[in-house]
Image (spheres, rainbow, N blue to C red):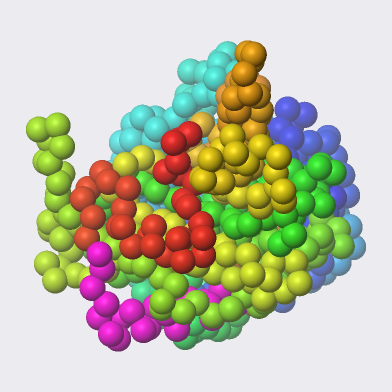
Amino acid sequence: MAALSSSKHCCSSSSVYSSSSSFGFHQPQRNIPFPAVSQKRLGSKSVSWQSKCSPSSNVILMQDGALATKKAAIDEAPPSKLKEGLLSVTLPEEHEQPINFNMNADESTVTITVVGASGDLAKKKIFPALFALYYEDCLPEHFTIFGYARSKMTDAELRNIVSRTLTCRIDKRENCSEKMEQFLSRCFYHSGQYDSQQNFVELDKKLKEHEPNFVASSGWKGCKSTFLLIDPTKHIRRCRKICASLSASAAASGWTRVIVEKPFGRDSDSSAALTRALKQYLEEDQIFRIDHYLGKELVENLSVLRFSNLIFEPLWSRQYIRNVQLIFSEDFGTEGRGGYFDHYGIIRDIMQNHLLQILALFAMETPVSLDAEDIRNEKVKVLRSMKTIRIDDVVIGQYKSHTKGGVSYPGYTDDKTVPKDSLTPTFAAAALFIDNARWDGVPFLMKAGKALHNRRAEIRVQFRHVPGNLYNRNFGTDLDRATNELVIRVQPDEAIYLKINNKVPGLGMRLDRSNLNLLYKARYSKEIPDAYERLLLDAIEGERRLFIRSDELDAAWSLFTPVLKELEEKKIIPEYYPYGSRGPVGAHYLAARYNVKWGDIGVDE
């Protein structure tokens, strides 16, 4: 993979993968071939991250309802709101030949602008991820971060807010306070409206004032990336305006990539409209649709576990696997954020993206290579092979108020931001099937919910019973007690464990079910990076493996749109379940229909 050096200490998580346009951060200096990319724009919700790479690099991050705009003249079109996540990178057409690019060189500089800097996503995820990359020496020596939002505040006030969210790696604590001071000293703030062209012109002037006066002898104009975080579905019109500004800036400054955060629409039609708006300004290879679950360590490890271990790959089919369960649960409700959630519901918020993406990675055929397009091609094949979801294979629920241990927990409709008559599901379970030779007849069960008894995200693979098992009588009538099960716990306490049957020591013949356990925190002392750190770094590198392609998105929505419309048109009433419970009883009946028991409620759990 073509690589760009940021530090000898920073090693890209995806450095083993190839990409036609990418940077790595693990070698002193490499030649990077950048294909010429036509300059287009985008439209959606946003946070913007620009990264101008030679004379000066400019990165803009936009978040929660904010706009993203780029550095450069903004005369041609006014900026506006962008998508919930976009990253854009544009390369000057004259640089079709490999370019000698060194992020550590004195003439290299990056300017990062976080639009929507006062939002929760910026404070809780974006700034901490940027600091983590800086702490690990993954950012160039010369960089500046600008916050942009409607809130009035000074540079010092922004630094104070950001400082509360920053932490240092547990395995590398030295110089932590010094690093924080250095990072915060490069953070600045500018207040402005998201739909004001004049405000963005003023921001552009400030960026130029703070940029070091480096002059590149190579003629390279620099590179820009834009991270946009606002609801793209709601702000397509404003996104078009912003993209026009971004495009005008990119024309003078370099390459452009746009990272788009979910939601990617509410159904097939709105998703297609969003894709058309983006492609009005951008090429497909400039659009990075981000699903942060794909940046989780255990999700990244899924293909390694399967394709690099001989004991698993031969078992990865209907011949040995009885069912696959994808489980997501949170032990808290909407807690004041119900206004956003009520517009989408748990199926759109979790199942159609996070869980379906994991399913596609789990079930795909062996790709030709580890190249991003080869992997995404196989994921698309899986999604296109899946049967449309029937409403009979879906159970929905909504949590209600409950008192436990003298503490009262509110119901979903008790949230003041939620309509009292809302039928939006906070829980859903579904049975999905892949109509191909490998997985024919194997139920893939999904379950996702809020206000449940615990917090977890995991993949559970239940294998078939041993034919003619000599020890069946030792397990009695419950043969599920003898089922081997592979569990991949994505969060919390990341782990991989395999449930096996073994003999309990002693003179008798008593069998027990035990775990062969790889608990990450026990095996590895290094702290696991946050998913946004990995995805930000991949986007800067141009590595697309963990981002969603437009045809992949179309295939995903085609599965869920019919059942979502039916649920809403028929006004299906969700089954109510107490706050802090295991969810609706209907989920167990759904699993029983396919002779399955949910693995997360067994005696072992």
Pick the front one: 85 or 151: 85
Q: Is residue 177 above or below residue 291?
A: above
The residue under the point 41% across, 78% down is 391
Stretch of the chain drawn in magenta: 552-575
x and y percent of residue 145 in the render? 50, 43
- On screen, residue 83 versus residue 486, left or right, reads left
x and y percent of residue 395 in the render? 36, 67
Asked whether residue 474 is drawn in magenta, I would say: no
The residue under the point 74% across, 35% down is 11
The residue under the point 66% across, 37% down is 471
- On screen, residue 394 versus residue 331, left or right, reads right
The reply to whether residue 468 is visible in this rendering is: yes
x and y percent of residue 322 in the render? 63, 57
Pick the front one: 213 or 427: 427
x and y percent of residue 183 in the render? 51, 31
Q: Is residue 54 above or below residue 576?
A: above
Q: The C terminus lies in which quarter of the figure?
A: top left
Q: How many marks?
A: 0
The residue under the point 21% across, 50% down is 578
Asked whether residue 554 is drawn in magenta, I would say: yes
